[in-house]
């Protein structure tokens, strides 16, 4: 009986502070957004990429409204899984979209892992196409796994320290980069040959991926002090910090590298921008900063996503097997999350990982806003205009992003569609064979 008791998911109330929650959120956001997406966004839309970051910030601000309202009303460790259940009940709709979010979060940690590898190799002037990139990423995931086996206090402490170091370091990089640059303005007339409105929408989609880490904060509701107030506050603070940092660094990179150089070094553009601006020592500084930032982001991501899968398991919306492992379901979902991340890190490149993540996330995000609009608006005290605008903007961005990928890399769109169809069919089969007695949304 003791073993059965040990399987139960449990959360330590008041074990996370507001500062810790902000550190976890910005840990995921900054790690992906600044260090790897800048060059990919420039490849799509030319020197307009700083504006694409601002465009993404505007869209995310509308999206964040629904999450703040939901988190204030229903703080829990399940976060988005719980919000979907409140809106749609214990249904296929809830399970499907929650799993899309789960996979997009796992994809985010794989994205961070490969970014860590790409930047680390710059210390030795090794090309980022080397097999050492996934090897280093896999190693980082294993270290993050061991850290996540520890207590929340240790996770919060490590994430907070790394968060403060990287925020301070990135701000310093941005300020100094702008100050020492030959020019502080960005030539917005410079564009890639095939730049278009669709390309700008695609770059904005990648920018959204850089901000979506704020959703990891929603998974800390059962462990955050004063969650009815602090989850929403942590979300808003994290987004505000990232808007300032992304804008500053984007202009710094664009001021020190030509468009062609940004695109060529798209997987490590900050390190490349540091060299002409500040010299070789600055490259080391930027690379070490990137290593700390991506490491902190992975620790934060694994912490949040494993708890989300544990909540889905507790809701009986997904199958679960112990595979002979001892301990609680939380520990098991931690293992599953890291193993899946290891596979993605080993076999997918950065651009395809990012594409899968943004498609899954935008589809899930629209389901959240629709749930607020149709089912929870009065209960959470939300105004209709914000979820309506969020859905409209997401639909435009998703359409533009899918279109540009169909023309440049159609395989990733086919893979995304196949995975979503597989999730839908397998979940429908599972729920059919394992009906949940109480179909309410409480």
Image (cartoon, helix red, strand yellow):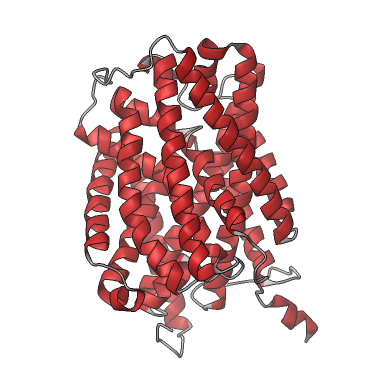
- The quadrant where residue 8 appears: bottom right
Give the image location of residue 144, x and y in percent.
Answer: 68, 48
Quarter in which the C terminus is drawn: bottom left
260 left or right of 298? Answer: left
359 left or right of 129? Answer: left
Give the image location of residue 99, x and y in percent.
Answer: 45, 63
- At x 42%, y 71%, the residue is 83
- At x 54%, y 68%, the residue is 227
- At x 45%, y 65%, the residue is 80
Give the image location of residue 299, x and y in percent.
Answer: 64, 49
- At x 51%, y 13%, the residue is 277
Residue farthest bottom in this picture: 437
Q: Is residue 308 visible?
A: yes
Give the image location of residue 237, x and y in percent.
Answer: 47, 51
* Residue 12 against residue 386 in the figure, above or below: below
Q: Is residue 137 visible?
A: no
* Residue 370 against residue 143 in the figure, above or below: below
151 left or right of 256? Answer: right
Q: Nearer the viewer, residue 140 or 286?
A: 286
Q: Nearer the viewer, residue 132 or 162?
A: 162
Quarter in which the N terminus is drawn: bottom right
């Amino acid at each position: 009986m003791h073993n059965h008791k040990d399987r139960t998911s449990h959360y330590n109330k008041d074990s996370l502070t507001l500062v810790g929650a902000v550190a976890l959120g910005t840990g995921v956001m900054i790690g992906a957004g600044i260090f790897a997406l800048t060059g990919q966004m420039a490849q799509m839309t030319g020197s307009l990429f700083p504006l694409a970051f601002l465009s993404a910030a505007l869209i995310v601000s509308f999206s964040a409204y629904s999450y703040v309202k939901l988190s204030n009303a229903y703080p829990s460790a399940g976060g988005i899984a719980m919000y979907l259940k409140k809106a749609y009940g214990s249904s296929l709709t809830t399970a499907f979209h929650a799993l899309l979010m789960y996979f997009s979060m796992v994809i985010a940690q794989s994205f961070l892992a490969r970014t860590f590898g790409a930047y680390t190799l710059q210390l030795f002037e090794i090309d980022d196409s080397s097999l050492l990139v996934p090897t280093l990423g896999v190693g980082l995931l294993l270290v993050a796994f061991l850290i996540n086996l520890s207590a929340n206090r240790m996770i919060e402490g490590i994430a907070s320290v790394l968060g403060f170091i990287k925020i301070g370091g990135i701000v310093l990089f941005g300020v100094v980069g702008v100050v020492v640059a030959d020019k502080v303005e960005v030539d917005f007339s410079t564009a890639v040959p095939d730049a278009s409105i669709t390309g700008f929408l695609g770059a904005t989609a990648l920018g959204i991926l850089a901000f979506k880490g704020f959703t990891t904060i929603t998974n800390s509701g059962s462990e955050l002090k004063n969650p009815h107030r602090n989850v929403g506050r942590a979300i808003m603070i994290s987004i505000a910090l990232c808007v300032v940092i992304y804008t500053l660094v984007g202009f710094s990179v664009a001021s020190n590298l030509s468009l062609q150089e940004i695109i060529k070094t798209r997987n490590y553009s900050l390190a490349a921008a540091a060299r002409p601006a500040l010299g070789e020592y600055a490259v080391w500084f930027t690379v070490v900063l990137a290593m700390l930032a991506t490491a902190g982001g992975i620790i934060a991501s694994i912490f949040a996503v494993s708890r989300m899968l544990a909540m889905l398991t507790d809701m009986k919306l997904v199958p679960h097997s112990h595979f002979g492992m001892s301990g609680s379901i939380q520990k098991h979902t931690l293992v599953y999350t890291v193993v899946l991340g290891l596979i993605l890190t080993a076999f997918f490149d950065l651009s395809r990982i990012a594409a899968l993540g943004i498609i899954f996330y935008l589809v899930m995000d629209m389901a959240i806003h629709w749930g607020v609009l149709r089912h929870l608006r009065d209960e959470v005290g939300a105004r209709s205009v914000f979820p309506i605008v969020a859905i409209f903007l997401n639909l435009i961005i998703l359409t533009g992003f899918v279109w540009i990928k169909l023309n440049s890399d159609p395989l990733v769109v086919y893979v995304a569609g196949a995975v979503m169809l597989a999730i839908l069919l397998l979940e429908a089969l599972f729920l059919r064979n394992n009906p949940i007695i109480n179909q309410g949304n409480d």
